[in-house]
Image (cartoon, rainbow, N blue to C red):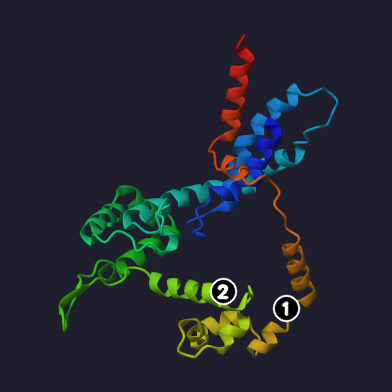
Amino acid sequence: MTAYLIINWVLEARSESHGFGFPFDRPHLDFYLRLQEAYPKLQELKQEMASGVPLLPLIPISKTLADNALSNTVLRMLDKVRIFDQLREAMRIAQPHSQAGLNDEGDAEITTIQARVTGFRHCEEIKELAVTTIAYRKMVTQIDKYWDKLFADPIQIATTTGAVSVQPQRTNNILEQFFRFLKRNGRKRSGDHALTKTLKAMLAQTPLIKNLENPQYMEIVLNAKASVAERFAEIDIVQVRRAFAEAQNVTQKYPKRMAEVFKIPHLPRRLLETSSKKASTP
């Protein structure tokens, strides 16, 4: 039972996410870290099992963790995740435990945010990274480029009911919310998951379709093809149908309450600690 819980705790690594999507959620990285944490515990459990009975094959896990290229990639990701989360905290964007999720407007206290971001931007670590690493140099360049827009003063607007103060948006959250609103309402109205026809029927002024007028955007989408129709012709309809069929066959693998178990941090260690305590109790 302990082995079962640990293995499924690893497989359900996405439960550690908060529904924000990448880069705020990193389910593949979480999966690797859980695998790394669970492997020693699974080795201990295997030794306790009957010898000669291959109840717990661990070679695939061992090969994965022994992959130097993969482990080096994970180390680089962890370093960048740490810096990213520092900037995320400084700017108060999409906080992990926000009830509003991606629709969170963030902290309205611009002065406080500016002070935190200033400290982040000019700390010694970021200065050194900007000198030695091109990715961080690009990040610093972007922060400096849009600094005035990030911390612009509120705009005073005269209305019939009096003066109104409007704070300029620091992100494109409004357009992202609009996009999610369109998807959600389109699916509720039609019952379809795919909204291709709905999107095609929208006016050219709609922000989603407006991107098609961007030559650089179209160049990426077309991928050297002459038209959108030619690009769509590359799609393998057999593969699409197979994917839809597999999605329809997905069933609930675990009891509903098990979802809470998979959210427990460091579950393998806690399970084994509990087992050790019970074994030592007379």
- Up-down: is 31 above or below 250? above
Work out whether residue 63 or residue 12 is closer to the camera in this orientation and state it. 12
- Estimate the x, y position of residue 241 in percent, counting from the top left: 77, 72
Q: Quadrant of residue 223?
A: bottom right
Image disc number at residue 188:
2
In the picture of the structure, the residue carrying the numbered disc 1 is 235
How many marks the image carries: the answer is 2
Work out whether residue 32 or residue 182 is closer to the camera in this orientation and state it. 182
Element marked by disc 1? loop
Contact (CB < 8 A) between labels 2 and 1?
no
- Up-down: is 223 above or below 108? below
Work out whether residue 244 or residue 43 is closer to the camera in this orientation and state it. 244
- Estimate the x, y position of residue 50 in percent, counting from the top left: 81, 22
Query: Where the N terminus falls, by quadrant?
Result: top right
Residue ID at (54%, 39%): 264
Q: Quadrant of residue 166?
A: bottom left
- 2 or 1: mark nearer the eye: 2
Q: Amino acid at mark 1?
A: Ile
